[in-house]
Amino acid sequence: MSKQAVLLDDAAQESLCSACPAWTIADDGLEREWRFPSFVEAFGFMTQVALLAERANHHPEWSNVYNRVTIRLTTHDLGGLSSRDADLAQAIDSLPATF
Amino acid sequence: MSKQAVLLDDAAQESLCSACPAWTIADDGLEREWRFPSFVEAFGFMTQVALLAERANHHPEWSNVYNRVTIRLTTHDLGGLSSRDADLAQAIDSLPATF
Amino acid sequence: MSKQAVLLDDAAQESLCSACPAWTIADDGLEREWRFPSFVEAFGFMTQVALLAERANHHPEWSNVYNRVTIRLTTHDLGGLSSRDADLAQAIDSLPATF
Amino acid sequence: MSKQAVLLDDAAQESLCSACPAWTIADDGLEREWRFPSFVEAFGFMTQVALLAERANHHPEWSNVYNRVTIRLTTHDLGGLSSRDADLAQAIDSLPATF
């Protein structure tokens, strides 16, 4: 959090797409969907994301229906996709591979 | 769970609106939105709802952005609003009054 | 939950030890400890166990310190180790292998 | 987190006892127990504490049995009760009054 958040320019966005290929850039945000065996695993994953988000003080727009979780990351303060979104996406991608 | 789920007829829907006045019936579902002091309280509430839902084996369509939580209940198996939605809405409304 | 809980006799306990080799029988209970990469994974695991426990209406005695989680299962109503403990242990063991 | 953690001297400990009267100082730690209506509320509370702890990067020793939660705070790095424990205890006490 001590790092200053900056909007990602085109080069940084391309680099992000390479680092996090499972995410899609759309409407100035980063989006990804997951499917889990059941609600138990889906909400266990959400709890881990909640902890990462609170640690980073940067929170997702997200939704869940049974075993599906959709996350959208954007930085409202800066009006677009920022380094904070990239950092959180990478932290989420580092959670156990089962997810 | 042992109780058979049934679609709510007009009279049952009116009775539900009286019992759970904070919820709105829309598109064959029950909807309600909450605002909390912060993400911590919002996700603590979501965890309680997750436990109620798993206990009932009936799961919401829901989303969260920071301190806001939106829940929609409907019964896909029956194609509409059922007694299971009414039961879960009432269980959610019975959570601590702070929420 | 519809199944009647029964205390495990010696043969059933031996069978349980084979089915769930990571658990130890001690003081009329089943015990197991986990270590995770960090608190985030530990608490994500605990949330999944909480959902399984609430679904089964059978709750663990458990503790956590950072990345370590210790769970003890016993059935107070019956004064010992029962089929409900065996069922919950097996459900916990079925969570994603990363844990 | 930017604040340097310091061990609490006798005066700081007395001040803490006044600020957080529900906690007990024991064995170089701060301890408190809660009872909730059921497991649902107990684990909802634990999830909020987990988020506060991860935000502070300071984690409790804690245990749960059904509706009871016991938390112990101490600072292993410093070998005793520190300002980080006092800060986390006050954050926990600030959670919704229902708890």
Image: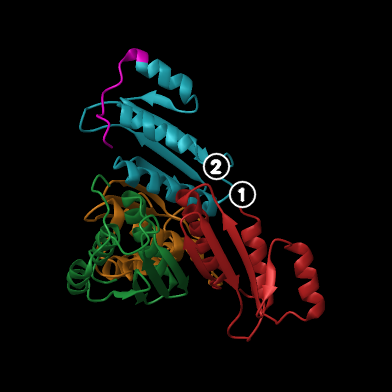
Chain colours: A red, B green, C cyan, D orange
- The label on residue C88 is none
Q: Quadrant of the C terminus of chain B?
A: bottom left
Count of number-bearing discs: 2
**Is C26 placed above or below D25 here?**
above
Give the CA distance from mark 1 to mark 2: 9 Å
Residue D12 visible in this rendered orientation of the protein: no
Chain holding disc 1: A
What residue is disc 1 on? A96
Q: Residue B32 in the image: x percent, y percent?
A: 34, 74
Secondary structure under the numbered disc 2 in the rendered image: loop
Q: Left or right of D97: which side holds C51?
A: right
| Tag shown at residue C96 | 2
Residue that protrudes farthest toward the right in the picture = A11
Specify the principal SS of the magenta part. loop
Q: Are marks 1 and 2 in contact (CB under 8 Å)?
A: yes
Q: Amino acid at mark 2?
A: Pro
Q: Position of residue D36 (x, y in %)?
A: 24, 56
| Residue C78: quarter of image | top left
Q: Is C4 colored magenta in this rendering?
A: yes
Q: Specify few, some or many for label 2: CA neighbours under 10 Å numbering under 14, 14-19, or 20 or more.
A: some
Q: Nearer the viewer, residue A42 or D82?
A: A42
Horizontal relation, residue C1 to residue D5: left or right? left
Q: Nearer the viewer, residue C26 or D81?
A: C26
Question: What range is drawn magenta here?
Answer: C1-11
Q: Is residue A27 one of those drawn in magenta?
A: no
Give amino acid for label 1. Answer: Pro
Identity of the residue drawn at 63% across and 64% down: A32
